[in-house]
């Protein structure tokens, strides 16, 4: 059985980390076929569009995409290519694991193993209803939260807990102040939680959540929250375990899923072989889970951990003298 996936090589360091990731995937004999598509600056230069129709068609057809970081030009096109992709394919669940890894520059070299599940299609982060008064003195923004959007993201979080054997879901909100929007999210989340008596559920205000994550991250298992809060919290969680270079992300919808490295394009080191491919490799592991290949996903994660433990061929940000591809080759050898 073969599976075709859309591959977007991205901008900046994107092509380097994608080549490294595909090298590792090819070593695993997964039966994957790649359909390459352009987006971002590369697509703008080649085709005059940030998101060409052919790229959208490829994702729609294959339903799975693996994506490197993209650059959204300042003053041109969409406010964010990533937001546009989420909107077009209704990728409502953003799933960001954060796990302690050995031999990383981290405040928590052990004990962190949590997932942030973030609503991905509504709320303040979408940027709807932005206005600026004629005199430039007053700016406004509309935030929309729906019962449907809240219900499906909370249900996704509880189903993820069941599927992966996790024991607790923390509902993160600001309903004490944002009584309409965050209040609706919390009320809906409470109702969904009653359908999962086997999963422990607790509630936490977002500012307290940030403090607790820094003090005792081990108390968290799965966090579910709205779009803007999830954007902030998931980056905080990445900081607990060594930064965005170790932070994968999945964007899941009913009809499509896009897996990505959540860090930027790092143009200052592009083409130098210094880029750490771990985030995209870990995103590829998420993709394998999604494709019902959990044993392969586990093998990939274990090979990454073994390579970090061995300290051979690591990229400079991890304290090594290797390069992007040598790191990937070391991982592939261990698989």
Image (cartoon, grey):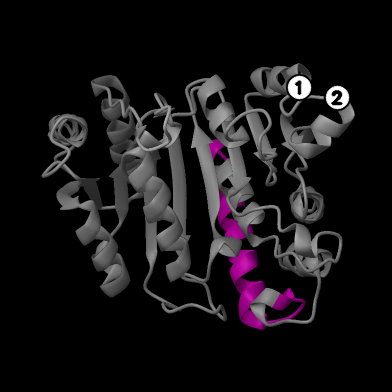
Residue at point 82% right, 64% down? 325
Residue where numbered disc 1 is placed: 52
Using the image as rendered, state which of residue 112 and residue 40 is in the foreground: 40
Left or right relative to 62: residue 229: left
Residue drawn 27% across the image and 74% down it: 215
Q: Secondary structure at mark 2?
A: helix
How far apart are the two marked residues, 2 and 1, measured between alpha carbons?
7 Å
Which residues lie in the magenta part?
290-316
Q: Quadrant of the N terminus?
A: top right
Q: Is residue 66 above or below residue 236?
A: above
Residue 155 point in image, percent of width and height? 29, 32
Residue designated by label 2? 47
Residue at 67% from the left image edge and 75% from the top image edge: 317
Magenta span has 296?
yes
Instruction: Establish if 219 lies above or below 52.
Output: below
Say whether residue 242 is left or right of residue 155: right
- Expressed as whole percent of the image width and height from the top left, the position of residue 131 reads 41, 27
Question: Is residue 274 shown to the viewer in this render?
Answer: yes
């Amino acid at each position: 059985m073969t599976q075709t996936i859309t591959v977007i090589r991205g901008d900046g360091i994107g092509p380097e980390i994608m080549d490294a990731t595909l090298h590792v995937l090819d070593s695993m004999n997964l039966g994957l076929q790649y359909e390459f598509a352009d987006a971002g600056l590369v697509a703008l230069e080649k085709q005059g569009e940030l998101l060409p129709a052919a790229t959208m068609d490829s994702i729609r057809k294959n339903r799975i995409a693996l994506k490197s970081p993209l650059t959204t030009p300042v003053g041109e096109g969409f406010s964010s290519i990533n937001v546009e992709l989420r909107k077009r394919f209704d990728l409502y669940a953003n799933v960001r694991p954060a796990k302690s890894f050995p031999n990383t520059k981290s405040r928590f070299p052990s004990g962190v193993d949590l997932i942030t599940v973030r609503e991905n299609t509504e709320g303040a982060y979408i940027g709807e209803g932005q206005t600026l008064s004629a005199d430039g003195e007053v700016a406004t923004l509309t935030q929309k939260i729906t019962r449907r959007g809240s219900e499906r993201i909370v249900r996704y979080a509880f189903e993820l807990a069941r599927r992966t054997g996790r024991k607790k879901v923390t509902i993160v909100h600001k309903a004490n102040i944002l009584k309409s929007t965050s209040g609706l999210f919390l009320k809906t989340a409470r109702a969904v939680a009653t359908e999962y008596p086997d999963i422990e559920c607790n509630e936490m205000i977002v500012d307290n959540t940030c403090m607790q994550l820094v003090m005792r991250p081990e108390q968290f298992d799965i966090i579910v929250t709205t779009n803007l809060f999830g954007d902030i919290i998931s980056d905080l969680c990445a900081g607990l375990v060594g930064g965005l270079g170790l932070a994968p992300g999945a964007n899941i919808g009913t009809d499509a899923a896009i897996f990505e490295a959540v860090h930027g394009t790092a143009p200052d080191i592009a083409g130098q072989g210094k880029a750490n491919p771990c985030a995209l490799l870990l995103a590829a592991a998420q993709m394998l889970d999604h494709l019902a290949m959990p044993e392969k996903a586990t093998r990939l994660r274990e090979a990454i951990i073994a390579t970090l433990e061995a300290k051979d061929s690591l990229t400079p940000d991890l304290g090594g003298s290797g390069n992007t591809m040598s790191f990937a080759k070391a991982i592939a050898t261990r698989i």
